[in-house]
């Protein structure tokens, strides 16, 4: 394993950083960008994450137009905004036809581009536009992409080829990217983007993981899937490595042991890659100065004298849900804060109290089955929304409803259903069906990371229209979805966070967005907190003390409706382990 020395990294003009949420992609991307810019390289850093945190690091409002960073000469930074991109994309497609085609035709085109998948495709179009722009590439030495958590990024990086294939096979009719006739320019753009992604001298994939089992497994999955798209130049970064320094603190010993165990059992796919490591730090990396000092900071070796923080346990939250009765329970938050684990803990806690519970996930990267493991609890059912199965089910439903149609009509319908957008609609349909199951049972939903979840909720009305267009009717589960999500006596949303700057900032923005959508969170969960442990270690104790500032901020944001889960030595997986953790 090598130190993360940027001069030694074989970097190409394009660098994509990906990995499970919370592994430090934004911090690593910022470190790369600032260091390269400080060396005199012209650098553009772009976030494709709908819940980007770059504005927190650089302390500046960002948009899709690159901004020069005052404290870092040679560095420009931009955030892609999917909603704004969708509006601009829609106008770019429809605008040229205004005043030329009859108004009803223009209105039909606008309706066609009102589907939620247009939001995704607009972000994708913006991404491939940047990737294929020779002008932008000529302006910068390096363009770094700070991407969304793995599942969203895998889809983004696979779309250029998916749309290439689709445009090869379909040349008439319409889709959510607009009328197919005359899309040769787009096809050229997507083909060039695919070529750039596959060229090892142009594009580097930088996998980022923590020395933890779940993030290493997800990095391996991303590596395998992106190899399938032809991206082969890969670097592997392990972030947050804590070295052994035996001062007799049991938490330090357990922390190091747990990291080493995860590295010893790293998936084979990752072992063949060149490894680089970044050190664990006790403070937040929340500013340009913090990032610049990351690799040179010297941590003290003196033990920290501190008191253990006392807070409510997760068991209180489970008791409150029991009193409220069956309904929807959703855990939301930034990627990597432990939403899957907490959803699993709530589900096991409710089932143990004698209630029927369905535990499911909308996160394509989540593995609730592995977290809960095998159990003999008959009251607990575990489900998963499988995008491929749901897409096939949705296709069959639409074709069946279409009935007997002409061969030309069937060809147009197949064209529509073969669009990569169909998967998004099918997953939304399955989400609505899952919510409809609540009532007789508790339905506990582990959601995808913040950005993807917000797009799912924001898009409810747009999906509503898209389903009406595709199937000719709106199922009751879809029609009642939003009223159910807005009913606080039926839907209980818990925001999950770590006691650190970035997860708390993002959770605060998530809470504001939810309130604007008419959904009020019931409480917050602070997960894996060292402040609740008795560690006196020089690094972990200082980390625990630094957490207090963010715990107080969470108490303010939640009106003190917060429960706490301490950092514990063993991996939280398996029914009995989860149940013991609920009871504290």
Image (spheres, helix red, strand yellow):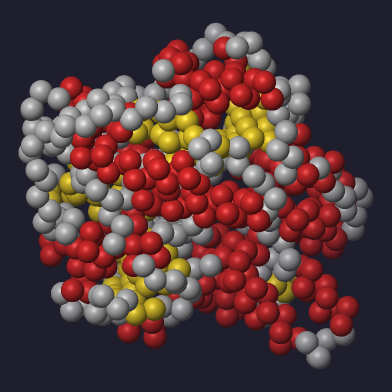
Q: Total of numbered circles in the picture? A: 0
Q: Is residue 521 left or right of residue 441?
A: left
Q: Is residue 301 left or right of residue 224?
A: left
Q: Nearer the viewer, residue 562 or 374?
A: 562
Direction from residue 254 to residue 187 in the image, left or right: right
Q: Position of residue 171 (x, y in %)?
A: 69, 71
Residue 222 in view: no
In the picture, which quadrant includes the N terminus?
A: top left
Residue at the right extreme?
404
The x, y position of residue 318, in whole percent, is: 57, 22
Please tell me whether residue 451 is drawn above or below residue 87 in the rendered image.
Answer: above
| Residue 46, image quadrant | bottom left
Which residue occupies the foreground of this view, 8 or 573? 573
Residue 430 placement (x, y as % from top left): 70, 40
Q: Residue at x 39, y 78 (%)?
A: 67
Location of residue 220 (image quadrant): top left
| Quarter in which the C terminus is drawn | top left
Which residue is drawn at the image coordinates 33% and 30% (left, top)? Answer: 309
Instruction: Say if residue 516 shows up in the picture.
Output: yes
Q: Is residue 13 above or below residue 508?
A: below
């Amino acid at each position: 394993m090598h130190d993360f020395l940027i001069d030694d990294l074989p970097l190409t003009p394009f660098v994509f950083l990906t990995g499970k949420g919370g592994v430090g992609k934004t911090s690593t991307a910022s470190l790369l960008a600032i260091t390269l810019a400080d060396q005199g390289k012209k650098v553009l850093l772009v976030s494709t994450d709908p819940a980007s945190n770059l504005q927190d690091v650089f302390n500046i409002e960002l948009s899709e137009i690159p901004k020069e960073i005052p404290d870092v000469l040679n560095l420009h930074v931009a955030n892609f905004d999917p909603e704004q991109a969708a509006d601009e994309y829609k106008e770019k497609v429809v605008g040229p036809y205004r005043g030329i085609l009859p108004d009803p035709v223009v209105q039909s085109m606008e309706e066609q581009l009102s589907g939620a998948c247009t939001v995704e495709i607009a972000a994708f179009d913006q991404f491939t536009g940047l990737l294929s722009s020779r002008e932008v590439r000529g302006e910068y030495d390096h363009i770094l992409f700070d991407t969304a958590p793995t599942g969203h990024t895998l889809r983004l990086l696979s779309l250029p080829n998916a749309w290439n294939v689709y445009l090869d096979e379909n040349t008439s009719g319409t889709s959510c990217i607009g009328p197919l006739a005359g899309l040769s320019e787009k096809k050229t753009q997507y083909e060039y983007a695919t070529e750039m992604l596959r060229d090892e001298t142009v594009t580097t994939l930088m996998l980022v993981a923590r020395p933890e089992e779940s993030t290493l497994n997800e990095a391996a999955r991303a590596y395998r899937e992106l190899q399938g798209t032809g991206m082969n130049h890969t670097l592997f970064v392990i972030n947050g490595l804590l070295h052994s320094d035996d001062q007799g603190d049991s938490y330090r010993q357990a922390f190091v042991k747990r990291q080493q165990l995860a590295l010893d059992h790293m998936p084979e796919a990752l072992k063949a890659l060149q490894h680089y490591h970044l050190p664990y730090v006790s403070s937040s990396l929340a500013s340009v100065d913090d990032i610049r000092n990351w690799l040179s900071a010297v941590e003290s070796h003196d033990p920290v004298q501190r008191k253990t923080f006392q807070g409510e346990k997760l068991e209180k939250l489970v008791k409150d849900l029991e009193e409220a009765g069956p309904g929807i329970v959703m855990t939301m938050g930034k990627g990597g804060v432990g939403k899957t684990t907490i959803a699993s803990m709530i589900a096991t806690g409710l089932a143990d109290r004698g209630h029927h519970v369905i535990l499911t996930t909308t996160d394509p990267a989540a593995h609730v089955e592995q977290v809960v493991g095998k159990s003999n609890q008959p009251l607990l059912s575990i489900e998963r929304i499988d995008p491929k199965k749901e897409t096939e089910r949705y296709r069959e439903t639409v074709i069946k409803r279409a009935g007997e149609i002409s061969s030309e009509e069937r060809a147009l319908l197949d064209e529509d259903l073969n669009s990569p957008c169909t998967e998004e609609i099918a997953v939304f349909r399955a989400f609505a069906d899952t919510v409809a199951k609540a009532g007789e049972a508790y339905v506990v939903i582990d959601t995808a990371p913040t950005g993807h979840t917000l797009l799912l909720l924001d898009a409810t009305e747009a999906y509503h229209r898209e389903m009406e267009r595709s199937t000719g009717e709106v199922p009751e589960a879809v029609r009642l979805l939003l009223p159910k999500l807005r009913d606080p006596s039926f839907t209980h949303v818990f925001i999950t966070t770590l006691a650190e700057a970035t997860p708390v900032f993002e959770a605060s923005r998530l809470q504001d967005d939810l309130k604007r959508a008419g959904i009020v969170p019931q409480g917050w969960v602070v997960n894996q907190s060292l402040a609740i442990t008795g560690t006196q270690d020089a690094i972990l104790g200082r980390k625990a003390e630094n957490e207090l500032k963010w715990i107080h901020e969470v108490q303010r944001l939640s009106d003190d409706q917060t429960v706490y889960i301490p950092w514990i030595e063993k991996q939280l997986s398996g029914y009995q382990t989860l149940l013991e953790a609920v009871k504290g």
